[in-house]
Amino acid sequence: MRRYGKHTDEDDIRSRPGRRNTRPRTNIRPKHEDAAEGMVLTVDRGRLTCLVEDRVVMAMKARELGRKAAVVGDRVALVGDLSGKKDTLARIVRIAERTSVLRRTADDDDPYERVVVANADQLAIVTALADPEPRPRLIDRCLVAAFDGGLTPLLVLTKSDLAPPDKLLELYGDLDIPYVVTSREELADGGAADRVRAELDGKVTAFVGHSGVGKTTLVNALVPEERRRTTGVVNAVTGRGRHTTTSALALPLADAAGWVVDTPGVRSFGLAHVDPSRVIHAFPDLEPGTEGCPRACSHDEPDCALDDWVAEGHADPARLYSLRRLLATREATEGD
């Protein structure tokens, strides 16, 4: 059966489009000028819980973001259903530039870095003075990650009723790191939480520490359970009805005075991602002395100009020792 006349023109013939590439290709992305600003509170299996104004909103990452992932602390732009009602879902269409990033790798041979928290102001390194014994090497690694990522470190020493803090504080005295010493009794009566809270006022603080040091107990004292229920974060994401620290979780302090980011307990803190040349920025008294260093100097080698700089009296030798101890921690194991 003839479908066309005798004198057909090619314009008369219908062409069937291919199965692929039917859409015109373009690099233009929607601007989403009406997107609302929010903050990522936690991430669980591809779903992100965000705070938009005073509402907790569930969201997915928009396809147009590609492989760029949002993490806890990220400032994001969202579109879609922002009501925060049950079974609603928004889309994250933009991730703002980060002011700081806390990264870690599984170990020093792992090339894959994991971003733990974005936009945090400081890193609270929680360490028990006994039971379990303190691990200075792990503390050093956390300090390197903080300096490298642009976070101010804070030492929180727990269980001072079991051991005195003097020896450990002496080890870090030359770094001028602020610290808070707590005991189990002070945590129970609220006195320790008040002292820690004073260091967190108006800041976003990520808490890190290995299991058993009392990190979760401290976070619970800082953010009471009724405050956690107000956010509604954990139930909405996991559906388990209770909080277990399996992923980072941002929790608001009372009166909007700051944020606490509770992170899972760590067994190791790999530093494969850290460029040693960036750690010197945390030592402004030593940094001018690096002008005479050879190119790509590790600041821990025979030709390092810091040796002469310190010998001439420009800086305290203990500070140079502390810098080199932190740099050496990338090649050492995380034991005591």
Image (cartoon, rainbow, N blue to C red):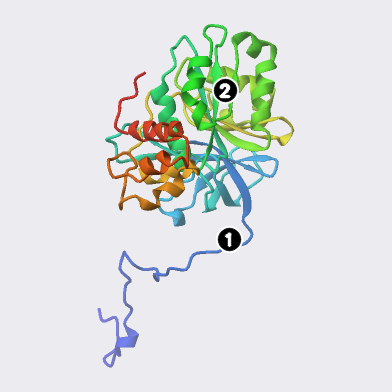
Judge whether 21 appears above or below 163 on screen: below
Task: Give percent across and percent down for residue 61.
Answer: 49, 48
Task: Give percent across and percent down for residue 189.
Answer: 69, 11
* Residue type for callout 1: His
Of residues 246 and 213, which is closer to you in this image? 213
Crowding at dot 2, Cα within 10 Å, few <14 / some 14-19 / many 20+, comes out as few
Task: Give percent across and percent down for residue 169.
Answer: 51, 21
Marks 2/1: CA distance?
35 Å
Quadrant housing the C terminus: top left
Q: In the rendered image, which residue does mark 1 sit on?
A: 32
Q: Which residue is drawn at 41% across and 44% down?
A: 309
The answer to whether one can see residue 154 in this image is yes
* Residue type for callout 2: Gly
- Answer with left or right where residue 229 lies relative to residue 135: right
User: Under tag 2, what secondary structure?
Assistant: loop
Q: Residue at x 42, y 70 (%)?
A: 26
Q: Which residue is drawn at 63% across and 31% down?
A: 232
Which residue sits furthest right? 255
Task: Give percent across and percent down for residue 42.
Answer: 53, 36
Quadrant housing the N terminus: bottom left
Of residues 67 and 114, which is closer to you in this image? 114
Of residues 227 and 64, which is closer to you in this image? 227
Q: In the rendered image, which residue does mark 2 sit on?
A: 241
Judge whether 175 appears above or below 244 on screen: below
User: Under tag 1, what secondary structure?
Assistant: loop
Crowding at dot 1, Cα within 10 Å, few <14 / some 14-19 / many 20+, comes out as few
The answer to whether one can see residue 274 in this image is no
Judge whether 278 appears above or below 24 on screen: above
Q: Which residue is drawn at 31% across and 50% down?
A: 296
Which residue sits furthest top? 162
Q: Sequence-wise, which precedes: disc 2 or disc 1?
A: 1
